[in-house]
Amino acid sequence: MSKYWVKRRDEVPRVPGEEAGDPVWYPLQHYFGFTAFGVNVYSAAEAGGALIGDHDEADSEQEELYLVTEGAARFTIDGEEHLVDAVGIVAVPDPTVRRSAVAEEAGTTVIVVGGRRASRFDSSWRAEHFEGVRRAG
């Protein structure tokens, strides 16, 4: 098994079974075998196409981060709509929050990163790196 890969998105196999209006799904976590977090790429073929189905992560206790890398997506987060253009970020650390997203234009692409909520994240960075850097909220 390789220690690393350098790939283009179109070199990653897509999840089969897409139906009309479904996003193209590139299962990065599965393909590369990550075990510390989940990560996927979703791309809408058309404006109005679903990107992220309506859901919460209460059962899985996952926190999720969405990064719009191309186009624009309309996110609905706990009933509130937000238009997020590239390179916008939607962070949902509370697993009980309901969320969904649809593409505002064809080709809209979102990277989704998620992982089980924990008491803390063990980082290789030292605390002094973040001195004076504010947090969201």
Image (cartoon, rainbow, N blue to C red):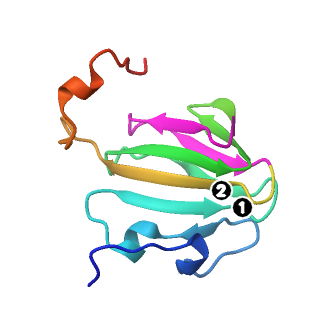
Residue 102 on the magenta segment: yes
Badge 2 is on which residue? 109
Disc 2 residue crowd, few under 14, some 14–19, many 20+, Cα 10 Å: many
Residue 29, quarter of picture: bottom left
Give the quadrant of residue 63: top left
Nearer-the-camera pick, 96 or 10 = 10
Task: Name the residue at 29% across, 81% down.
Answer: 2
The quadrant in which residue 92 appears is top left
- As drawn, 127 above or below 55: above
Return the x and y of residue 113 as percentages of the image width and height: 43, 52
Instruction: Give the magenta-colored segment's residue range.
Output: 84-104
Does 93 sit above or below residue 51?
Answer: above
Any magenta on residue 25?
no
Label 1 sits on what residue type? Ala
**Quarter of the figure with the N terminus:** bottom left
Number of numbered callouts drawn: 2
